[in-house]
Image (cartoon, rainbow, N blue to C red):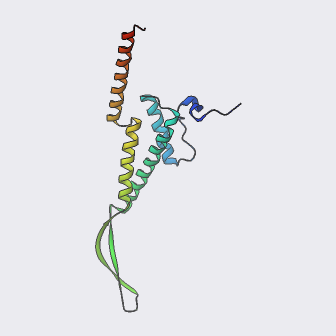
Amino acid sequence: MTAKKFKDSNDGKLSYRAPKHLSPLASACWRKTVPFLEEQKPVDKIDSFLVEMYCTQYEIYRNSYEHLKKHGEVQEIYKPVQDMTGEIIDRQFQGFKRNPMTQIYSDAIKNLTKIGSELGLSPKSRSELMGLNMQEDEEEIDWTSKFGGG
């Protein structure tokens, strides 16, 4: 017997079980996201890449948020003060700089928003998808009535 093609495995649907290579946090996101997607509009196996990206971006978002909670959005900058032998005897406060983790956090939020929208995970994208589904249904009815099918 030959192995099923990727798109045909699990009847072409996403598994509720997360891929093994995902971390515990990304796996938890997968287990919450896939059933929700299936309730809204069934997703296909090919969408697993988008769901995986969504879940890994969620992990990055959470990790960067935890880092920011611990270390803050800004970091103090100090310049070492040395004596004539080169030994550091003090530190002089120079100001603040943005914690680089804020950019990672921001990028993860943007990626989550974009990928989530593609998957229909935001209220706005769900309403747009529902509008498209209604439009498709109306077009199908119009098509049927034009040609007398039934």
Q: In this picture, is 106 found above or below 148?
A: below
**In the rendering, at what x and y percent does residue 12 appear?**
55, 30
Q: Which residue lies most toward the right here?
A: 1
Q: Which residue lies most toward the bottom here?
A: 84
Q: Residue at x 57, y 28 (%)?
A: 11
Q: In this picture, is 58 found above or below 131?
A: below
Displayed quadrant of residue 72: bottom left
**In the rendering, at what x and y percent does residue 117 appear?**
37, 38
Q: In this picture, is 8 found above or below 61?
A: above
Identify which residue, 110 or 140, lies in the foreground.
140
From the image, which quarter does the C terminus lie in? top left
Identify which residue, 40 or 3, lies in the foreground.
3
Report the number of discs: 0
Direction from residue 2 to residue 58 in the image, left or right = left
Q: In this picture, is 73 found above or below 39?
A: below
Identify which residue, 69 or 49, lies in the foreground.
49
Q: Residue at x 48, y 47 (%)?
A: 25
Q: Which residue lies most toward the front here?
A: 147
Direction from residue 4 to residue 149 in the image, left or right = left
Displayed quadrant of residue 8: top right
Identify which residue, 129 or 36, lies in the foreground.
129
Direction from residue 3 to residue 139 in the image, left or right = left
From the image, which quarter does the N terminus lie in? top right
**In the rendering, at what x and y percent does residue 16 appear?**
53, 35
Q: Residue at x 40, y 87 (%)?
A: 87
**In the rendering, at what x and y percent does residue 82 appear?**
36, 86
